[in-house]
Amino acid sequence: MSVAKIIEISAESSENFEDAIRQGIQRASDSVENIKGAWVKEQQVIVDGGNIVRYRVDLKVTFVIK
């Protein structure tokens, strides 16, 4: 039987939402083992002078507990 845990993280990128997701998962995997999936809970943009300067995502990351 497997038991999973879910944590919530936020990540940002100046490129796009996909890059923010990728960076968030990569950083989470530095300290959390057995990541099995993630759910994008929310997306936001930060605007400066009428231009999008940052893409932010809130992720729910699922990992299996050993």
Image: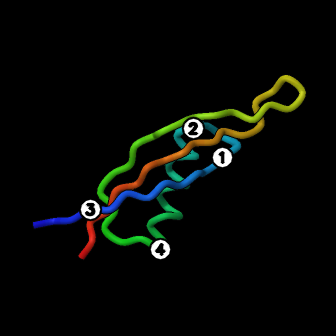
Asked if the residues shown at circle 4 and circle 2 are in contact, with their CB atoms under 8 angstroms apart, the answer is no
Observer-side mark, 4 or 2, equals 4
Crowd around label 2: few <14 · some 14–19 · many ≥20 (10 Å): some
Crowd around label 3: few <14 · some 14–19 · many ≥20 (10 Å): few
Residue at 40% from the left image edge and 54% from the top image edge: 61
Residue that badge 3 annotates = 4
Residue that badge 2 annotates = 17
Instruction: Determine the CA span between mark 1 and mark 4.
Output: 20 Å
Which sits earlier in the primary sequence, circle 2 or circle 3? 3
Asked if the residues shown at circle 1 and circle 3 are in contact, with their CB atoms under 8 angstroms apart, the answer is no
Measured as percent of width and height from the top left, residue 38 is found at 38, 48
Measured as percent of width and height from the top left, residue 60 is found at 43, 50
Residue that badge 1 annotates = 13
- Which residue lies most toward the right here? 49
Q: Is residue 42 left or right of residue 1?
A: right
Residue that badge 4 annotates = 31
Q: Is residue 3 left or right of residue 6?
A: left
Crowd around label 1: few <14 · some 14–19 · many ≥20 (10 Å): some
Q: Secondary structure at mark 3?
A: strand
Which sits earlier in the primary sequence, circle 3 or circle 4? 3
Observer-side mark, 1 or 3, equals 3
Residue at 26% from the left image edge and 66% from the top image edge: 64
Q: Quadrant of residue 33?
A: bottom left
The kind of residue on which mark 3 rests is Ala
Q: Secondary structure at mark 1?
A: strand
Q: Secondary structure at mark 4?
A: helix
